[in-house]
Amino acid sequence: MRSVHAVVLSLLLLSLSACALLPDRDPLNINVVGFEPLQSQDMEVRFAVKIRVQNPNESAINYNGVALDLSVNGQPLASGVSDQSGSIARFSETVLTVPVSVSAFSVLRQTLGLSQTQTLNNLPYVLRGKLAGGLFGTMRFTDSGKLSLPGSTVGTW
């Protein structure tokens, strides 16, 4: 019975010490820097989201995939993935471009939501995503802010 307790205690101490080996990283700084239209198909709209990714850490971040989810006005609007890979050097930044799709149903949902708010200015958005980097290297991020559509200074629905 004592040997079982000794094994359990040893495994517990080993697992706690393994957590100390994981890197302590600061979160990435993400900013949306632009949107570009892409060729669409049937009932969907496609565009490229450009995000600036800043690495405030003392070690490089290697990634092998990017995923994004964009919500506007509290409703899901677009999502996209890219299998691009690369590295963001320590205390450095890069701009990544990720193609995203907006379905006709998302546009309809947004239109109904806008009819309730009656304005196109200061629409809140939330961008969630991740840089895939293997088992312990995946970095999740969130960016949020207000979106004003071009030409909407006094526009209402």
Image (cartoon, rainbow, N blue to C red):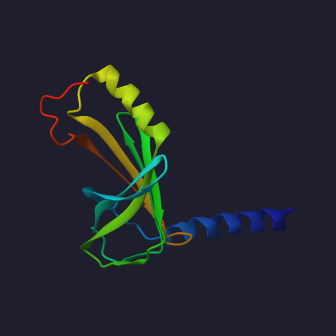
Q: Quadrant of residue 110?
A: top left
- Total numbered labels placed on residues in the image: 0
Q: Quadrant of residue 141?
A: bottom left
At horizontal 69% and vertical 69% (from top left) the residue drawn is: 10
At horizontal 17% and vertical 29% (from top left) the residue drawn is: 155
Vertical placement of 118 versus 31: above or below?
A: above
Do we see residue 30 in this rendering? yes
Q: Given the current orientation, which residue lies at the most extreme left position?
A: 153
Vertical placement of 72 versus 111: above or below?
A: below
User: Horizontally, is 117 left or right of 156 in the view?
Assistant: right
Q: Quadrant of the C terminus?
A: top left
Could you say which is closer to the camera, residue 73 or residue 14?
Answer: 73
Image location of residue 112, percent across then percent down: 40, 26
Image location of residue 1, percent across then percent down: 87, 62
Could you say which is closer to the camera, residue 140 or residue 70?
Answer: 70
Do we see residue 139 in this rendering? no
At horizontal 78% and vertical 62% (from top left) the residue drawn is: 5
Image location of residue 67, percent across then percent down: 46, 60
User: Horizontally, is 35 left or right of 101 in the view?
Assistant: left
At horizontal 31% and vertical 71% (from top left) the residue drawn is: 57
Could you say which is closer to the camera, residue 16 or residue 55?
Answer: 55
Vertical placement of 117 versus 55: above or below?
A: above
Q: Given the current orientation, which residue lies at the most extreme right position?
A: 1
User: Horizontally, is 64 left or right of 97 in the view?
Assistant: right
Image location of residue 143, percent across then percent down: 32, 50
Vertical placement of 86 versus 97: above or below?
A: below
